[in-house]
Image (cartoon, helix red, strand yellow):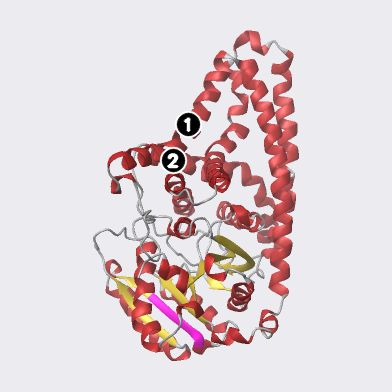
Amino acid sequence: MEIQRSIPIHIGRASELSGRDRFIYRWLERLPGILSWGTIIGSIVLSYFLPVYAAIFIIAFDIYWLLKTVYLSVHLRAGFKRTRHNMSVDWTKKLASFPEHKDIYHLIILPHYKEEMDVLEKGIQSILDSKWDKSNMIIVLSGEERAGEDAAKRSIILKEKYGNQFGEFLILTHPKDVVGEMPGKGSNISFAAEEARVLVLDPRGIDYKKVLVSAFDIDTVPYEQYFSCLTWNFLTEPDRFRASYQPVPLYNNNIWDVPALSRVSALSATFWQMIQQERPEKLATFSSHSISFQTLYEIGYWQRNMVSEDSRIFWNALLAFDGNYKVVPISYPVSMDANLAPTFWQTLKNIYKQQRRWSWGVENVPYILFGFLKNKKIPLFKRIRLGFVQLEGFWSLATNPLLIFLLGWLPIMLGGEAFNKTLLSYNLPIVTRNLMTLAMSGLVVSAIMSWYLLPKRPEKYSIFRTVSMVLQWVLVPFTLIIFGAIPGLDSQTRLLFGRYMGFWVTPKHRVE
């Protein structure tokens, strides 16, 4: 089973430790919230007592944000170009030069809760339609006992329909109320992976090193050549068992059906992942991802006691293998659902909850920093760089939109009459507006890129729906604050005060 190590790699929160370690971990949990709230409160205090310095800071920050936007835009264009290219490549043909690809098995884990049949079936059908030998595919459909009998019945129906079309088709029920587990995806897929090992891999004598595990959200629809592209990346990676493999998430399953705010939020997540794929040194696993079963087995599967298991598996492996681990960006898409509920207001509520769950990935920050304090085998520079990147990323998420769009006016509002008579006071809004106009001009590029990623418009929608797909990008300042900074602060504040979150399952609603 799991390799025993001197450093525990499956820590969920401070309460699982004791003594000095618990004290240190708890303060590291507080650190992101302290930095973010300290920045916001400090900006307000500085604007009141030292408005000149506050104004200089805001202008400097706006310039920094403009340069950062240009930098990210360059990576976005490169990521977009690479993804479109990879979608046009014949990966099956490329694999012909690797005869060993015929020995690779794909184990696809599909955890589900209360999703309807059409959601479950679309994902399985897309796997069936993919260009890979189905006899070398193992489907694991893992439901939840707490979801009730309806979920179990749907699993049985799907096995009856698809079971004989794959090498193996397991249906499992993840038991509820297991001590030490948090109900959610992490505990489910960890259970499913071990059951697949016991029930399929070991009885059939399948070498763990020849099995690639794809942990999919239940609404994940892999594109036609996903498994071929994944296998090619795996076989050409020099250190293939010290890497995870990350596709680009597109939220195209229902993109034409969802409101503009949901589309902007979903496409922004896609664009961010494209940017990260061009910066693999900063990339961690996200949502649907793949990993060798050999590697997964060595580190004890995904953590069962936390929310953000998708990214934590990367950090588990990085600590377990003393820093010798990475994410390989495959720049090839899988498609998932954008947020949609029966009503507009429920959709907005679900978007917020999903963004808060994603931003709860801040729980990785104390884990990473604590692990880096303990594991001295990882080079010091690498520990400093990775720790800073993660801490700065969550700080930026929670503070930058507020500093840009709201707090930039504080020196004028709070600086008093003396400051408002200065030339700096007069020029502050002009300089800020001009810098932000330049930075936001990148939205034109985003609109063009999003257009090329869209599936064909359904006949039920008119050309006006297409126009809205372009105009929707004016909503970005709103989404950055409401669905970026605020849920980011929400998560960090909860972690600051030890109000830990549980796993929230995003409801899947489809338009008839």
> Could you tell me how far apart the alpha carbons at marks 1 and 2 are, in whole angstroms?
9 Å
* Location of mark 1 (residue): 37
Occupied quadrant, residue 229: bottom right
Q: In terms of secondary structure, what is the magenta stretch mainly? A: strand
Residue at horizontal 72 percent and vertical 64 percent from the top? 82
Occupied quadrant, residue 196: bottom left
* Residue 137 among magenta residues: yes
Badge 1 or badge 2: first in the primary sequence = 1
Image spot of residue 319 (x, y percent): 46, 55
Labels 1 and 2 touching (C-beta < 8 A): yes
Image spot of residue 139 (x, y percent): 44, 80
Local crowd at mark 2 within 10 Å, few (<14), some, or many (≥20)?
A: many
Quadrant in which the N terminus appears: bottom left
Q: In this view, which residue lies farthest toward the top? A: 418
Is residue 494 in sight in this rendering? no
Observer-nearest residue: 175 or 92? 92
Image spot of residue 296 (x, y percent): 44, 68
Image spot of residue 510 (x, y percent): 48, 67
The local secondary structure at tag 2 comes to: helix
Local crowd at mark 1 within 10 Å, few (<14), some, or many (≥20)?
A: some
The answer to whether 46 appears left or right of 423 in the picture is left
Observer-nearest residue: 468 or 67? 67
The local secondary structure at tag 1 comes to: helix
User: Could you tell me the amino acid type at mark 2?
Assistant: Gln
User: Could you tell me the amino acid type at mark 1?
Assistant: Trp
The answer to whether 500 appears left or right of 510 in the picture is left
Residue span colored magenta: 136-141
Is residue 444 in sight in this rendering? yes
Which labelled disc corresponds to residue 181?
none
* Residue 391 among magenta residues: no
* Location of mark 2 (residue): 492
Q: How many marks?
A: 2
